[in-house]
Amino acid sequence: MTRNQYEQHKRRLEEQLRAGIQLLETAYQAQIRALELVWMLQVEAGEQEPFVSPQPAPAPSPPKEETPLKEEVPLKEEVPPPPGRPRRRGPGELDDEIRAALSNLPETTFTRRNVCEALGYEPDRGSLYRILQDLVREGSLRVQSVGTGQIPTVYRQTGVHDTPAAG
């Protein structure tokens, strides 16, 4: 290895180090923003007291090198915020929305995906499954075919949309 090759290799390693540090700092900032978003969502839900976090101090930048970088690594300046979750529904609210959405579903058969499309969002899978099972037990729906693996359960409306009489 010649002295020139040694110097080139050393510069390339230093460039990679600076790019790695910059990536790490960007990832850290994205994690901080995500943490603050989760905190604010909890505050809105009334679970915690509000906390205003001070802006993190910018990390010191590595010393500039006299020679220009040959290959600049393009870095993403802004990380888009994570997709918002649907708001938390109150007791019975999701049940009411699903019952209302039944009128928008095909009269023949439908799957969980059709219910989500009629709602306009995808609710918690466990809550949706529980409500669909309640509708089957009360007779508003019946299971046309049970799903397995990648094959979804297919439901059919029975035409009975009232809750069963207590007896």
Image (spheres, rainbow, N blue to C red):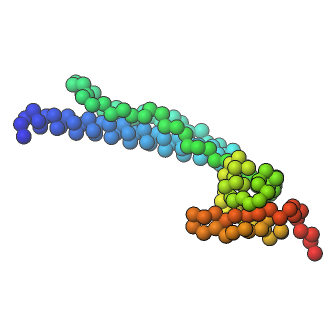
Tell me what residue is drawn at x 11 percent, y 37 percent. Answer: 6
Quadrant of the rendered image containing residue 68:
top left
The answer to which quarter of the image holds residue 23 is: top left
Determine the residue positioned at 83% across, 64% down. Answer: 158
Q: Is residue 90 visible?
A: no
Q: Could you say where residue 90 lies in the image, as x and y percent from the top left?
A: 77, 53
Give the x, y percent position of residue 162.
89, 62
Question: 95 or 142, which lies in front?
Answer: 142
User: Residue 145, percent across and down?
Assistant: 69, 69
Q: Quadrant of residue 95?
A: bottom right
Q: Nearer the viewer, residue 159 or 27?
A: 159
Q: How many marks?
A: 0
Q: Is residue 51 left or right of residue 64?
A: right
Farthest bottom residue in view: 167
Considering depth in this image, is 103 or 85 the residue closer to the camera? 103
Query: Residue at (17%, 37%) from the top-left corner?
Result: 10
Question: Which residue is rendered at x = 79% and y = 57% of the image?
Answer: 107
In the current view of this chain or complex, which residue is farthest to the left?
2
Q: Is residue 66 visible?
A: yes
Q: Is residue 4 left or right of residue 65?
A: left
